[in-house]
Amino acid sequence: MAARPDPARAERDFIARQPMGRLATVDDITPLVVYLLSEESRYVSGQAMLVDGGATI
């Protein structure tokens, strides 16, 4: 976005295209990381886990 002529506008346009209407925060990503580091995920393998706010359909 920084390479665009108007970076602030590029960021607003990007956010407007997100289904959740905002960018992710650390708090959005942390629960999946904690799960994957926990014993509860011991049988999980070979999965793509998406934390993208609905951007991937």
Image (spheres, rainbow, N blue to C red):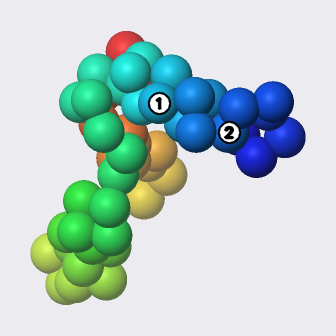
Residue 7 is labelled as 2
For image coordinates 33% across by 70% down, the residue present is 26
- The kind of residue tagged 1 is Arg
Query: Alpha-carbon neighbours of circle 1 within 10 Å: few (<14), some, or many (≥20)?
Result: few
Answer yes or no: is residue 3 visible. Answer: yes
The residue tagged with tag 2: helix, strand or loop?
A: helix
Q: Residue 18 placed where, x, y %?
A: 37, 25
Rendered-image quadrant of the C terminus = top left
Measured along the vertical axis of the image, is residue 51 above or below residue 11? below
- The kind of residue tagged 2 is Pro
For image coordinates 57% across by 29% down, the residue present is 9
Tag 1 near tag 2, CB within 8 Å? no
Quadrant of the rendered structure where residue 21 is?
top left
Q: Residue 34 placed where, x, y %?
A: 24, 79
Relative to the observer, which residue lies in front, 3 or 43? 3
Measured along the vertical axis of the image, is residue 20 above or below residue 57? below
Residue 12 is labelled as 1
For image coordinates 35% across by 52% down, the residue present is 24
Answer yes or no: is residue 36 visible. Answer: no
Relative to the observer, which residue lies in front, 21 or 52? 21
The residue tagged with tag 1: helix, strand or loop?
A: helix
Rendered-image quadrant of the N terminus = top right
Relative to the observer, which residue lies in front, 45 or 16? 16
Measured along the vertical axis of the image, is residue 28 above or below residue 9? below
Quadrant of the rendered structure where residue 40 is?
bottom left
Query: Alpha-carbon neighbours of circle 2 within 10 Å: few (<14), some, or many (≥20)?
Result: few
